[in-house]
Amino acid sequence: LELRYCAHCEKDVAWSAWNNTKDLPKTDSGHFYLTCDVTLKGQVTMAADAKIILDLNGHTVQGAADSRVFSLHNEGCYLALLDSSTNQTGKVIAGAATDIIHEGIGVWVRYGTFDMYGGTLDVSKVTSIHHGTAVYVRTKTEFNMYGGTIIGGTTHKNPSADKGGKGGAGF
């Protein structure tokens, strides 16, 4: 553990180095900073009540093809994304999508909250029905963007929301 300042928390906290090149934290709550680039084999589905603050630390997370990068699919989960690198080069890149349903999404929030403080969400290479959605939020969820950049993608509203269905919106 390393004691470092957390811009999200506005205080010094204990951070854990993350050096797995094929996966990201999803079950244990805590503050994690990347020490290497990560190439995912599938989506990162956050566990119920997991609260993860992830510092890209100038590294790249490459999403898997035909998969969301992050899925906040369980109740009570929380993800904060930031980048403490000097040049702000940390990024999350959505994988290529050949499936036309819900794929090519950077962060899918069905339950919980996603806060973005820094880094880049890049969905510019995705050509699914959602045309590369950086963040897709469902009803009763939160997305707060305090900093960072979104590259590519489209904004849209789920048409089922107008028909009494479970709506959502993409950014």
Image (cartoon, rainbow, N blue to C red):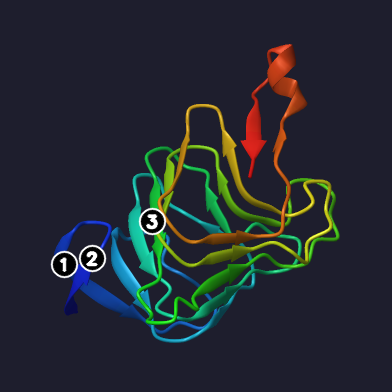
**What's the distance in space between the residues labelled 3 and 2, CA to CA?**
11 Å
Left or right, 25 with reference to 120? left
- The local secondary structure at tag 3 comes to strand
Q: Mark 1 or mark 2, which has the lower sequence index?
A: 2
- The local secondary structure at tag 2 comes to strand
Q: Above or below — where is 139 with respect to 142? A: above
Q: Above or below — where is 123 with respect to 18? A: above
Q: Residue 8: horizontal and vertical position, in percent?
A: 27, 57
Identify the amino acid type marked 3.
Answer: Ala
Quick one: label 3, few (<14), some, or many (20+) residues within 10 Å?
many
Label ID, residue 6: 2
Q: In the image, what residue occupies the spot 54% across and 38% down?
A: 110
> Marks 1 and 2: CB-CB under 8 Å?
yes
Q: Residue 45: horizontal and vertical position, in percent?
A: 52, 55
Q: Nearer the viewer, mark 1 or mark 2?
A: 2
Point out the residue furthest to the top here: 164
Q: In the image, what residue occupies the spot 18% across and 58% down?
A: 10
Label ID, residue 13: 1
**What's the distance in space between the residues labelled 3 and 1, CA to CA?**
15 Å
Q: Above or below — where is 78 with respect to 16? A: above
Q: Mark 3 or mark 1, which has the lower sequence index?
A: 1
Name the residue beneath numbered marker 3: 80
Label ID, residue 35: none
Left or right, 48 with reference to 40? left
Q: Which of 23 and 104 is in front in this view?
A: 104
Q: Residue 128: horizontal and vertical position, in percent?
A: 83, 53
Q: In the image, what residue occupies the spot 38% across and 80% down?
A: 85
Q: Quadrant of the N terminus?
A: bottom left
